[in-house]
């Protein structure tokens, strides 16, 4: 049975009818759209009407949810802790000295 008290809130986790977990990442009241992201990183957009009639249930966030954000983590060279192995962003390819003269 649907959890009728389960309103979409950004950052909260839910399960769908198949037991697949997802996080609410945006709620657009004006457009009446909810964007959700599954653990594997795929994104889906739902309208408010679908949300109201779906059999979603609230759940705790997964213990290991770094897969959702596609981090490449590994142990550091002394075996203590983790760090991200790839640090890049959209501005990495810009040569500011050349561009700004």
Image (cartoon, helix red, strand yellow):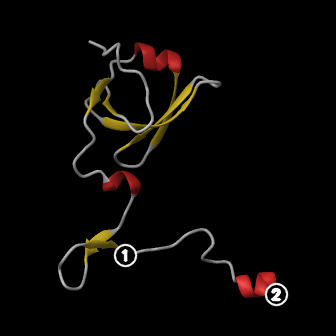
Give how far across and how far down residue 48 sits, in percent. Answer: 52, 19
Can you say whether 29 is above or below 95 in the image? above
Please identify the quarter of the rendering in which residue 81 is found. Answer: bottom left
Can you say whether 35 is above or below 39 in the image? above
Can you say whether 56 is above or below 25 in the image? above
Residue with the most extreme right position: 101
Q: Residue at x 80, y 82 (%)?
A: 100
Instruction: Pick whichever of labels 2 and 1 is earlier in the sequence.
Output: 1
Give how far across and how far down residue 101 sits, in percent. Answer: 82, 87
Residue that mark 1 sits on = 85
Please identify the quarter of the rendering in which residue 15 is found. Answer: top left
Residue with the most extreme left position: 79
Give how far across and how far down residue 84 sits, in percent. Answer: 36, 71
Q: Residues within 10 Å of mark 1 (few under 14, many from 20)?
A: few
Of badges 2 and 1, the one in the foreground is: 2
- Comparing 12 with 55, the one in front is 12
Alpha-carbon span between mark 2 and mark 1: 32 Å
Give how far across and how far down residue 38 sits, in percent. Answer: 38, 41
Q: Say which mark, if any, is on residue 63.
A: none
Number of numbered labels in the structure image: 2
What element does badge 2 sit on?
loop
What element does badge 1 sit on?
loop
Is the Cβ of the residue at disc 2 closer than 8 Å to that at disc 1?
no
Residue that mark 2 sits on = 101
Q: Residues within 10 Å of mark 2 (few under 14, many from 20)?
A: few
Q: Quadrant of the N terminus?
A: top left
Q: Residue at x 37, y 63 (%)?
A: 71
Q: Residue at x 33, y 55 (%)?
A: 67
């Amino acid at each position: 049975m649907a959890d009728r008290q389960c309103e979409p809130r950004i950052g909260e986790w839910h399960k769908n009818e198949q037991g697949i977990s997802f996080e609410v990442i945006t709620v657009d009241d004006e457009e009446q759209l909810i964007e959700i992201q599954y653990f594997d990183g795929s994104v889906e957009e739902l309208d408010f009407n679908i949300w109201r009639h779906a059999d979603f249930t609230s759940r705790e966030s997964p213990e290991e949810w770094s897969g959702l954000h596609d981090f490449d983590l590994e142990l550091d060279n002394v075996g203590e802790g983790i760090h991200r192995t790839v640090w890049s962003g959209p501005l990495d390819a810009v040569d500011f000295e050349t561009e700004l003269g």
